[in-house]
Image: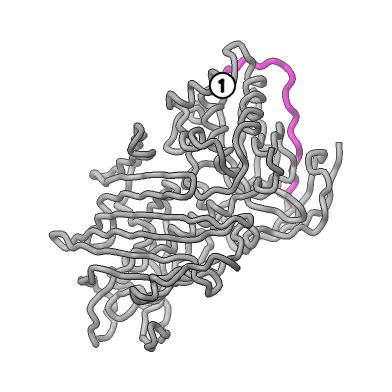
Amino acid sequence: MAKIKWNMVWGIAITMIFLGLLAVRLELFKEKPVDFPVSRNVEVSRSPEAWMNIYQNKKKIGVIHRKFNPLKNGRFQTREFVTMQINTMGVIQALNLSTETDLNPDMSFSSFNFELSSSLFRFNARGYVKKDKLILFTGLPTNAQQKTVIPLKDIPHINGNIYEAAFVSGLGKDKTRDFNIFDPSTLGLRKISVTRYADEIIPILGKHVLTQKFCADFIGAKNCAWLAQDGEVLKETGILGLSMEKVSAKQAQEGIATDGIVDFTQIASIPANITITAPSKLTEIKIKFDVTGNLPFLLQGGRQTLHQNILTITKETFPDTPFQNNKPTVFQKYLQSSPLVQSNAPEIKKQVEKIVLHTDSPQMKLQKIVQWVYRTLEKKPVLSVPNALEVLNNMAGDCNEHAVLTAALLRAAGIPAQIETGLVYLNGRFYYHAWNLAYIGQWVTVDSVLNQIPADVTHIRLVRGEGGEQLDLLGAIGKVKLEVTSTKND
């Protein structure tokens, strides 16, 4: 068994979320020596090809190649290809993303096809808007894709088009507008606020260019973009030292850095004020929890209580009494299959039958499934959109992959299960991490990476849910401060 040094890898998901926000679908326009439009809708024409470099602290780690094809009635189709080198827990891996989108004149989308591939995993999500619904298909095209229907109040934008959507809408200076976005990497629908700031002159390709500056506030995380007079996105900056900048085709073809790339997981972690030698032996921990901004964290409830910014986490007891799994009706939704937790897939059901017996109690099923995932999955950082079927096929991954597979197996075994994400202590720091919550007469926190039932009290829940709900963690990076004030042992 590999040493548990990869286990706290949740920076991957944050990287994916940020990449989705950062990877603006670049539009190139013909230069026009005119002033900016102020408060009117703007009709734009576009160049068929564009390039941007992706940087982390000024070191090139990726490139974006974008193609444009005009359609009828002011609509158009874009194809974007992203290649990046990502460092997580000291391992540098290649990540490739491809997004094909049919866009309406206002930059909302009518259909999309998103693909991700890395050294180990592949993921595909495609969908189209039909009246007031988003028809979504997920999974690899070679297998049976899972269909999901998502109700829509408004036609959303693919997240990367937000700045161009603000430009096309004629957003005025010092004005703010909300947009609905859909993120293919998390399958989440969210609202994002975009504000236009004062115009700035920035250097691009050896020239000083007058730009419109827009900044997007997404759950407390701030990204900014600079657009030329004709609407071309020239530059972007965001969290974790990431940025993008317009380059020539020749510059885009220059090499990507392979050394000195900052570890995303490490820079997203939070230092602890004390050393915790045996987290699994603690029965209680009190933490002074400070966060900048009003972020939608789920700090209160279950084993966690929050009073005057002191967060108390108490270790749960594992019920010894055999429990007849008469689940309250409200918990039935935690037995259902979802696009990323495919508990009704034949492969998942078949695997469950190999792990547990029908005569096992819910407690025994939970223990067997958590221990099987712990023993069987190779623990390594991967770049993926974690989904249970791909994890079962590859039998490897970090905490995200462990959590989605555990949730799918538990649900298939008749045990309501959820996914929680937040922070966990390891070697003097709190790292972003994912684990599970299972119902066996009471809700019990479990961690199949660490083989803990119940999980230790250094697991700090910030978010509960899968896919889009995990976007809430984006705003936490760099804004959470923790101070352990007391601990209790067994």
- Name the residue at the top extreme: 359
Q: Where in the figure is residue 401, as x and y percent of width and height?
A: 55, 40
Q: Residues within 10 Å of mark 1 (few under 14, many from 20)?
A: some
Looking at the rendered structure, the kind of residue marked 1 is: Lys
Q: Residue at x 53, y 51 (%)?
A: 13
Element on which disc 1 rests: loop
Left or right: 218 in relation to 247: right
Q: Residue at x 41, y 52 (%)?
A: 183
Left or right: 451 in relation to 421: right
Q: Which quadrant holds residue 461?
A: top right
Residue 215 appears in the picture as rendered: no
**Magenta span: chief secondary structure:** loop
- Name the residue at the right extreme: 489
* Quadrant (top left, top right, bottom left, bottom right) of the N terminus: top right
Q: Residue at x 48, y 49 (%)?
A: 119
Q: Residue at x 59, y 60 (%)?
A: 264
Q: Where in the figure is residue 399, as x and y percent of width and height?
A: 60, 43
Q: Where in the figure is residue 457, as x and y percent of width and height?
A: 74, 42
Which segment did they paint magenta?
A: 311-326
Q: Per the image, is 155 magenta? A: no
Q: Is residue 111 above or below residue 335?
A: below
Q: Where in the figure is residue 363, as x and y percent of width and height?
A: 66, 21
Residue indicated by mark 1: 327
Q: How is the image coloured?
A: one colour
* Quadrant (top left, top right, bottom left, bottom right) of the C terminus: top right
Residue 452 appears in the picture as rendered: yes
Considering depth in this image, is 179 or 320 the residue closer to the camera?
Answer: 320
